[in-house]
Image (cartoon, rainbow, N blue to C red):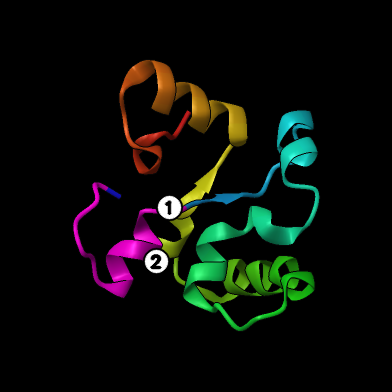
Amino acid sequence: GDGETSDVESHILDSCNFTRNDPLTLLFFPFSIRYHALHHLFPSLPYHNLAGAHTYLIQHLPETSPYRGLDRPGWWVVAKRTIFGGERAATATS
């Protein structure tokens, strides 16, 4: 975030999920912590259940759910836009 106090909803919406299996994401996030937004939504859910929970949510949430907008193509896309583009990770979508 921007260093200001935020509520739980803002905290979740400021995180993302890396759900594609690109090499850099797998290298830096080999476990299910690639589901970072989901982890913030359900912090007590064990990491080994995150992928299954994500699949369940995607299958059952409506198309308009804000959760669906938290997926990012991979770590490098977010890092590149954040570092070189001066944008926050939450706005990196391609």
Front in this rendered view, residue 28 or 93:
28
Q: Residue furthest bottom?
A: 44
Whether residue 19 appears in this view of the structure is yes
Instruction: Give percent across and percent down for residue 9.
Output: 30, 70
Whether residue 64 appears in this view of the structure is no
| Residue 8 located within the stretch drawn in magenta | yes
Instruction: Give SS at disc 2.
Output: loop
The magenta span reads: 2-15
Q: Residue at x 28, y 63 (%)?
A: 10
The quarter holding residue 44 reads bottom right
Q: Residue at x 69, y 70 (%)?
A: 50
Disc 2 packing (10 Å; few <14; some 14–19; many ≥20): few
Instruction: Give percent across and percent down for residue 16.
Output: 49, 51
Q: Residue furthest front?
A: 3
Badge 1 amino acid: Gly
User: Which residue is the site of mark 2?
Assistant: 65
Q: Residue furthest left?
A: 4
Above or below for 30 versus 10: above
Instruction: Give percent across and percent down for residue 48.
Output: 79, 71
Badge 2 amino acid: Ser
User: Which residue is the site of mark 1?
Assistant: 69
The quarter holding residue 64 reads bottom left
Q: Residue at x 64, y 67 (%)?
A: 54
Front in this rendered view, residue 59 or 5:
5
Q: CA distance from mark 1 to mark 2?
A: 8 Å
| Residue 34 located within the stretch drawn in magenta | no
Instruction: Give SS at disc 1.
Output: helix
